[in-house]
Image: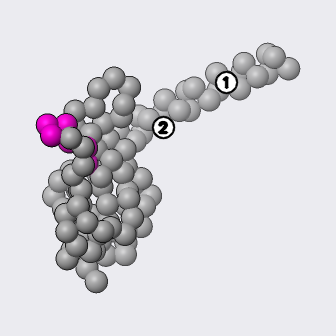
Amino acid sequence: MALKIRLQRHGNSHRPVYRMVVAENTARRDGRYVELLGTYAPQAQGNDPELTVKLDRVDYWVSQGAKPTDTAKDLIKRSRKDAPAAEEAATEEAPAEEKAEAVEA
């Protein structure tokens, strides 16, 4: 059983939304999959995230022998590049919340 990390196309005409999944290489493009790893909405607007990927699960499946397609590989790279910025923003918000709780107590 050879596994691939690839994209499934969903959404409406001219408004695609893709799911990044782990699937057998013999399965249809939009068919059965093993696990959902994330989403990619190239036309996302407002506060909707364009790309969300579970990087820990991607690492797990790659260690199990799953091969990402070229597009999936590019999106994973982009998600890894964006991940440190998201972690820094989360750590900056957390101390401010802790200070507010300390003032209330």
Kindly tell me whether residue 79 is visible in this rendering. no
Q: Return the residue nearer the eye: 79 or 34.
A: 34
Q: Please tell me whether residue 77 belongs to the stretch shown in magenta.
A: no
Q: Quadrant of the C terminus?
A: top right
Which residue range is magenta in the image?
13-18
Residue under pointer 2: 87
Tag 2 secondary structure: helix
Residue 90 vertical placement versus 18 (above, below): above
Indicate the position of residue 1 as horizontal and vertical percent values: 28, 83
Residue appearing at x 42%, y 53% in the figure: 54
Indicate the position of residue 3 as horizontal and vertical percent values: 28, 74
| Rendering quarter of residue 35 | bottom left
State the mark number for residue 32: none
**1 displayed left or right of 95:** left
Residue 55 vertical placement versus 28 (above, below): above
Q: Return the residue nearer the eye: 43 or 91.
A: 43
Residue under pointer 1: 97
Amino acid tagged 1 = Glu
Residue 1 vertical placement versus 91 (above, below): below
